[in-house]
C-alpha cells in the first residue's frame, strides 16, 4: 500500500484521495443545513439553559454546563450550534493524529479519514448533547491512553484520571471507561516490569473518584439537590435495554461471521480464481447483503450495526495477521479500541447502536496498527459508500428525505435550515399566533413530547418538567400544568405530541379533556389547535 501511494506514477491516485477527502468533509458538514427535529436537539439545549427547578440532572450535568457555555459564546441560533457539534465530531477523528505519530503514508491516512467521514455522515444528526461531548472526550482519552502505552508516565496517569472523571460527569454511563483504563495501566505495568505492581492503577482510580466526587459536590449543595431533578425525569427501561442488547448482539455476530468468512474465503481463493470473477462474486454478495439487511431501517439501525461489525472485523483480521505480536503496544491499542466501542452503548436504551459513535476512531486505529489494506476491504468500501449515501439522503433524522427539505424557516433562530413545507408553515403559524396572544397579555405554555423546540424558542412557556416524555394520554404531569395556570385569568396551553402531518388521532387527549373541565376552550386553527382560558 505504501508503494501504491508513494510511487511517482501514482500521483493521480494521491490527487483522487485528496479530492475525495475534501468532498467527504464538505458532505459531512453539509448535514447542518437540512432537517429539523423537535425533540432530542432541543431537549439537551433546554436542559442546559432552563433545567427544571434550576438544577441540572446529575447523570449529565457537566454536559449541560458545557453546552450552556457554548451557547453563551456562539449565540442561540441553531445553525451555529450544529456547526460546532459537527466540529466536535470532526476533531474526534483527527485529534489522535495530532497527538500521536503514525508511520502510514499521508495519502493512506487521508483515504481512511475520507471514508470514515462519508460512512459516518448518516449519524451526524445535529444533536449538541452528551453523546457528541462523550465521543470527543473518549477520543481524547483513547489518544492519551495510546501515549501512555508508548511511554508510561505519572503525568499521563493524572491526565487520564482527569479526563475519565470529566467523561463520567458529562455522561454517567461513561463510568465504564474507568475499569478499562484501570486494567490498561495495570497490564502495562506487567509488560514493562514483568510483574503486577498496581501502584499507578490504584493512583488512577483514587484520583478519578476524588475528581468525580469533587465535581458533583461543587455543583450540588446537598444530596437532595443531587437526586431531586433526576427523580422527576424519565428513566431507562431495563427490559427494553437488555432486549435491544440481545437482538443487536445476535445481528452483529451474524454480520461478523459473514464479513470475516468472506474475507478468509477471498484470501484462500484469490490465487486460484480469476480476480475479476472473485471481485464480481464478492461484490454481488455484498450488494445482496446490504440490500436485504442493511438499507433503510429506522434510525439506520442495521447500517449502524454493519459499520461497527466491519470495524471489529478489520481489527480482528489485523490481530490474526500479526499473531506474533499479541502483547505489543500496537496490539494493545487494537484490544483497547474494541473495548472503547462499547462504552457509549453502556446504559443506552438504543442497545448497541451507539457503538458506531467510535467508528470515528477507526482511521487512527488502522493507521497506527499493522493493518494491511487489500482488495477485499476496498471492494467492501466501494459497495458500502452508495448505501451510506442512500441512508443519509433518504431520510434526515426525525424529518423527511433530502428532496422534501426544500423550505427554509422564516424565524431567526432557525435561519439557513431547510425542512418540509408543512413543518416550516407549522412553526411560522404558531410563531405568529404566539405574538398575537402575547399582545393580548395571554400567558402561554407548551406541553407534549414534541414541544421541546418551542420551549427553546419561547423559554417562558416551559412548564418546569425535567422529563423528555410528556404524554397527553394520562395526567402524570397535570399537577405541573395546574401549578402554572392556577389563579391566572388568561392562559393558553399548546399541546404538541406529534409532528405536523403525522397526527393519527388514536391517542386520547386526557390532558385536553381535563383542561376543558377546568374552563378552557379548544381553539382550532388551520394546522394546529390549543386550549385557551380567557375573560
Image: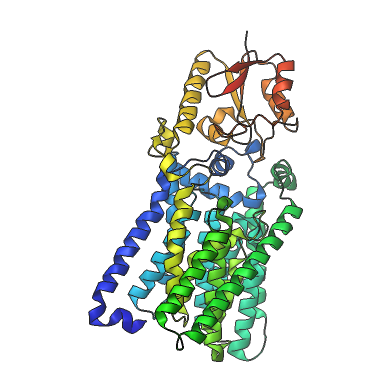
Q: Is residue 337 above or below residue 165?
A: below
Residue 531 vs residue 285, the one in the foreground:
285
Residue 91 vs residue 428, the one in the foreground:
428
Q: Answer whether residue 80 is visible to the viewer in this image.
A: no
Residue 441 vs residue 478, the one in the foreground:
478
Q: Is residue 21 above or below residue 316?
A: above
Residue, x 56% and y 24% (percent of image)? 528
Q: Quarter of the image containing the C terminus? A: top right
Q: Quarter of the image containing the N terminus? A: bottom left
Measured as percent of width and height from the top left, residue 494 is found at 60, 25
Residue, x 40% and y 78% (percent of image)? 276
Residue, x 37% and y 60% (percent of image)? 24
Query: Quadrant of residue 159 in the image?
Result: bottom right
Task: Count the marks.
Answer: 0
Colouring: rainbow
Measured as percent of width and height from the top left, residue 241 is found at 71, 56
Residue, x 64% and y 74% (percent of image)? 182
Q: Answer whether residue 234 is visible to the viewer in this image.
A: yes
Measured as percent of width and height from the top left, residue 408 is found at 39, 35
Q: Is residue 24 above or below residue 263?
A: above
Measured as percent of width and height from the top left, residue 368 is found at 45, 78
Q: Is residue 154 above or below residue 404?
A: below
Residue at the farthest top position: 535
Query: Quadrant of residue 193 in the image?
Result: bottom right
Amino acid at each position: 500500500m505504501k508503494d501504491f501511494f508513494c510511487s511517482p506514477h501514482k500521483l493521480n491516485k494521491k490527487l483522487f484521495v485528496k479530492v475525495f477527502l475534501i468532498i467527504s468533509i464538505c458532505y459531512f458538514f453539509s448535514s447542518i443545513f437540512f432537517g429539523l427535529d423537535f425533540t432530542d436537539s432541543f431537549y439537551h439545549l433546554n436542559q442546559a439553559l432552563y433545567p427544571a427547578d434550576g438544577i441540572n440532572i446529575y447523570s449529565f450535568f457537566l454536559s449541560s454546563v458545557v453546552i450552556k457555555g457554548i451557547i453563551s459564546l456562539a449565540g442561540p441560533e441553531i445553525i451555529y450550534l450544529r456547526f460546532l457539534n459537527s466540529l466536535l465530531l470532526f476533531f474526534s477523528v483527527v485529534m489522535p493524529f495530532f497527538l500521536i505519530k503514525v508511520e502510514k503514508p499521508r495519502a493512506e491516512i487521508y483515504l481512511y479519514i475520507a471514508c470514515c467521514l462519508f460512512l459516518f455522515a448518516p449519524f451526524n444528526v445535529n444533536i449538541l448533547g452528551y453523546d457528541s461531548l462523550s465521543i470527543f472526550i473518549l477520543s481524547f482519552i483513547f489518544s492519551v491512553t495510546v501515549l501512555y502505552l508508548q511511554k508510561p508516565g505519572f503525568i499521563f496517569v493524572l491526565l487520564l484520571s482527569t479526563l475519565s472523571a470529566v467523561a463520567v460527569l458529562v455522561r454517567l454511563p461513561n463510568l465504564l471507561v474507568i475499569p478499562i483504563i484501570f486494567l490498561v495501566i495495570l497490564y502495562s505495568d506487567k509488560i514493562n516490569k514483568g510483574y503486577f505492581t498496581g501502584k499507578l492503577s490504584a493512583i488512577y482510580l483514587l484520583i478519578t473518584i476524588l475528581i468525580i466526587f469533587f465535581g458533583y459536590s461543587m455543583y450540588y449543595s446537598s444530596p437532595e439537590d443531587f437526586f431531586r431533578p433526576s427523580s422527576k425525569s424519565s428513566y431507562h427501561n431495563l427490559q427494553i435495554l437488555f432486549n435491544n442488547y440481545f437482538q443487536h448482539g445476535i445481528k452483529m455476530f451474524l454480520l461478523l461471521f459473514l464479513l470475516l468468512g468472506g474475507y478468509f474465503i477471498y484470501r484462500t481463493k484469490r490465487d486460484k480464481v480469476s480476480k475479476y470473477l472473485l471481485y464480481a462474486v464478492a461484490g454481488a454478495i455484498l450488494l445482496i447483503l446490504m440490500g436485504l439487511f442493511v438499507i433503510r431501517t429506522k434510525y439506520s439501525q442495521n447500517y449502524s450495526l454493519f459499520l461497527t461489525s466491519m470495524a471489529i472485523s478489520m481489527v480482528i483480521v489485523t490481530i490474526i495477521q500479526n499473531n506474533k505480536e499479541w502483547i505489543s503496544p500496537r496490539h494493545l491499542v487494537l484490544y483497547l479500541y474494541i473495548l472503547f466501542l462499547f462504552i457509549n452503548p453502556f446504559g443506552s436504551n438504543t442497545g448497541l447502536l451507539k457503538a458506531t459513535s467510535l467508528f470515528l476512531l477507526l482511521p487512527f486505529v488502522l493507521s497506527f496498527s499493522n493493518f494491511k489494506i487489500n482488495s477485499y476491504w476496498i471492494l467492501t468500501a466501494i459497495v458500502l459508500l452508495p448505501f451510506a449515501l442512500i441512508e443519509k439522503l433518504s431520510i434526515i433524522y426525525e424529518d423527511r428525505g433530502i428532496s422534501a427539505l426544500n423550505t427554509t424557516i422564516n424565524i431567526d433562530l432557525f435561519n439557513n435550515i431547510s425542512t418540509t413545507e408543512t413543518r416550516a408553515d407549522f412553526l411560522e403559524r404558531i410563531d405568529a399566533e404566539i405574538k398575537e396572544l402575547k399582545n393580548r397579555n395571554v400567558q402561554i405554555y407548551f406541553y407534549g413530547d414534541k414541544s421541546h423546540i418551542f420551549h427553546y424558542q419561547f423559554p417562558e412557556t416551559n412548564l418546569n418538567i425535567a422529563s423528555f416524555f410528556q404524554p397527553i394520554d394520562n395526567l402524570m404531569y397535570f399537577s405541573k400544568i395546574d401549578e402554572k395556570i392556577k389563579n391566572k385569568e388568561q392562559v393558553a396551553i399548546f399541546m404538541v405530541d406529534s409532528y405536523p402531518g403525522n397526527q393519527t388521532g388514536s391517542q386520547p387527549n386526557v390532558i385536553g379533556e381535563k383542561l376543558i373541565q377546568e374552563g378552557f376552550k379548544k381553539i382550532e386553527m388551520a394546522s394546529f389547535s390549543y386550549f385557551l382560558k380567557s375573560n
